[in-house]
């Protein structure tokens, strides 16, 4: 999981570097947009995973309600 996030962040950094090295406005705008989307995606997925993990852990720590169990009674002949 972390590898994909790191990969997206690295690609975003490369897009930023290319954007700063070009003088063509449309190319620069496209590279900046791509960098922002990649960075946002890397951050969002990390946040979503951490939130899901926290929720799971919180549920595991809550006291579980005791459920009444019914015992099966043998059938009466007759």
Image (cartoon, rainbow, N blue to C red):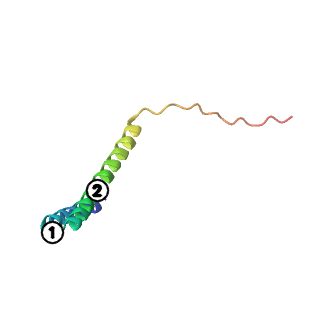
Image side of residue 1 versus residue 23, left or right: right
The percent position of residue 17, horizontal first and vertical second, equals 15, 65
Q: Indicate the secondary structure of the residue bearing disc 1.
A: loop
* Nearest to the observer: residue 34 or residue 30: 30
Report crowding for label 2: few under 14, some 14 to 19, many 20 or more residues within 10 A (C-alpha). some
The residue sitting at 60% across, 33% down in the picture is 69
Residue that appears at 58% across and 30% down:
68
Counting labels gives 2
Residue 73 placement (x, y as % from top left) = 71, 35
Q: Position of residue 57 (x, y in %)?
A: 36, 42
Looking at this rendering, what residue extends furthest in the left direction?
A: 21
**Residue 4 image label:** none
> What residue would you read off at disc 2?
42
Of residues 27 and 46, the one drawn nearer to the viewer in this rendering: 27
Given residues 56 and 73, the one toward you in this image is 56
Residue 14 percent coordinates (x, y): 18, 66
Find numbered disc 2 in the image and state the secondary structure of the residue it sits on: helix
Q: Nearer the viewer, mark 2 or mark 1?
A: 1
Q: Residue at x 34, y 42 (%)?
A: 54
Instruction: Answer few, some or many: residues within 10 Å of disc 1's Cα (few below 14, many 20 plus, some between 14 and 19).
Output: few
Q: Classify the position of the C terminus by image quarter.
A: top right
Which residue occupies the extreme right position in the image?
78
Q: 51 or 57: nearer the eye? A: 51
Residue drawn at x 20%, y 65% as measured from the top left: 25
Horizontal side of residue 9 vs 75, given as left or right? left
Kindly identify which residue carries mark 1: 22
Q: Is residue 30 left or right of residue 74?
A: left
58 in relation to 1, above or below: above
Sooner in the amino-acid sequence: mark 2 or mark 1: 1
Distance between the alpha carbons at the discs numbered 2 and 1: 25 Å
Quadrant of image for the N terminus: bottom left
Q: Mark 2 and mark 1 in contact? Answer it, CB < 8 Å.
A: no
């Amino acid at each position: 999981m972390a590898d994909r996030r790191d990969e997206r962040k690295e690609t975003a950094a490369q897009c930023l570097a290319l954007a700063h090295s070009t003088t063509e406005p449309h190319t620069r705008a496209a590279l900046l947009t791509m960098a922002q989307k990649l960075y946002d995606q890397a951050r969002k997925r990390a946040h979503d995973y951490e939130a899901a993990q926290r929720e799971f852990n919180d549920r595991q720590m809550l006291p579980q309600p005791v459920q009444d169990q019914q015992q099966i009674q043998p059938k009466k002949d007759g």
